[in-house]
Amino acid sequence: MSTPAKYGLWLALGTLWCTLAYVLPDFADNAIGGLRGWLTMVAYVGAVGIVSGLILLLISGSRWLTAILLPLYMGIGAVVSYYRVAYHATVTPMVIEATLHTNMGTVSTMTSGWLIVWVIVNIAVAITLSIYRWRALPLRGGWFISVAACALLIVYTTCNDRLSNSLHQRYPLHIIHSIKGYAAQRHAATLTREKMPYHNEHMADSLDMVVILGEALRADHLGLNGYERQTTPRLSERRHLYSFSQLYSEYTYTSASVPHILTPADSTHTERTYTHHSFIRILRDNGFRSVWLSNQDMSASYAPFIHEADTFIFPHKDKSVFVFSPWYDETLVNELAQDRTTYDGARRLWVLHTIGSHWYYNNHVPASEQYYQPVTTERVITLNTPEQIINSYDNTARYMDLIVDSIATLMEDRIAAIVYVSDHGEALGEDGQWLHAGEVDGMHRPACLIWLSDKYAARYPERAAALEQLSDKPCRTDIIYPLVLRLSGIESE
Ligand SMILES: [Zn+2]
């Protein structure tokens, strides 16, 4: 066999190994119902595998580089793929942070015999490939191969908008992406901000405030807003429940809309998301013990506000929206219930960042709560029927009803208020569009609900009356900041 043929075979085998061992596990929990779904997944796996192929091509230009970097590349790949398969865990900025701050005791509880065996197997494969490269592939002009591969790698990973997320959220680029994300969060949290002036003569001496950030839930898919399906059977029965059914969100994706909701930013002062503190800081400064509970990641755009809280809890820090295995918001309710019993303060604030109605819908609603059938069977949204998609979506609305209702039950014995606001809406087939981060009207129409406990409504009847008056008026998510403050007895100036 000629040297180019041997080299091609070496490269093909190495790429195949990396693709099957490190890329395929990332797609293993995708819902696939039919042949088109399988073919699409194979195409995605192949497209991501090409990145590993180009990296192999790059380092193979030098036998020294191969000997040093190939075992490292395959060793890290083995660790990442092990956690992906065994725990459905991926690499996120929160995982990078946890890794940097984890002591060896914790590491030892997370390793297993299988992990060690899998790492040894992969390093053995890498060493075998390196020896073969060293002895049997006397390449001339190796540096040229490396430079060309490097250029191809840059072009392939940056000039491909459609594949951008697929590439950057999977091995190996998700490691670089997460490290950059972590650095951006740290940097954002160190920037100085100012507080909007306020006065606090009407501060509640005792209050439990819960702010729930929903995800992609549309107002017009709630039974209590007149939707043909009763997706809110529990909340519809509650007293002192106010639905802001005409709320408009300027932004249609999480990283832009969440900072706008939390801060005094409004349509004429959008820059306040970068210059001002959120209501979390104002409440904390006024004696509220504050906790951020999250089922999503910590984006740099709202990391500063998470750090404003006394503490934050991320029960699923190893999940990203590119992990298609189940996780549920009831975890946050359990965390809240536990935190409530362990910290018995007079003024308390919990901010819950839910995964809510994020695609893949079925993965965020337990099977026992999937009320509308048939549900989706394919992760690639367009391979499902509109009926399946809307059934799955409406199940998330009904599950939100369960989540918010169970938090209200927890709070019933206190002077308490819950503000639920989805960060944005969702397209459900209008103009042939689905999901969010676009300009379909439904994406701009988030659900928003406020509940007051009986004790709250009895103590502050004028606030209950104001909510009643305000709730059916058209308004923007700008109102959430002053509203949370006002419900806490603080007036923003
Ligand atoms: Zn969102």
Image: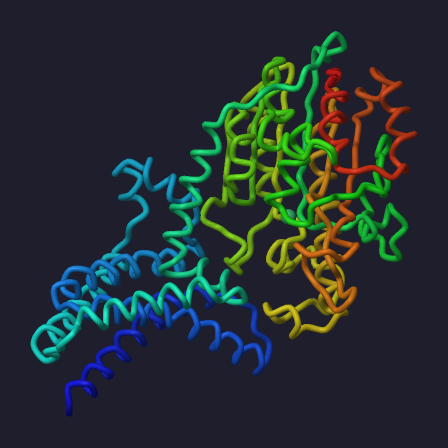
Query: Residue 295's image quarter?
Result: top right
176 relative to 57 in the view: left or right: right
| In-front residue for pair 73/237 | 73
Q: Residue at x 26, y 71 (%)?
A: 57
Which residue lies most toward the left here?
135
Q: Residue at x 55, y 23 (%)?
A: 193
Can you give x and y, in whole percent of width and height, for residue 388 in the image?
Answer: 72, 69
66 relative to 439 in the view: left or right: left
- Residue 447 appears in view: yes
Q: Residue at x 17, y 72 (%)?
A: 142
Can you give x and y, in whole percent of width and height, for residue 118 in the image?
Answer: 26, 63
- Residue 283 appears in view: no
Which residue lies most toward the top here?
201
- The quarter of the picture where the C terminus appears is top right
Q: Residue at x 80, y 27 (%)?
A: 452
173 relative to 354 in the view: left or right: left
Can you give x and y, in whole percent of width and height, for residue 156 in the image?
Answer: 41, 68
| In-front residue for pair 242/182 | 182
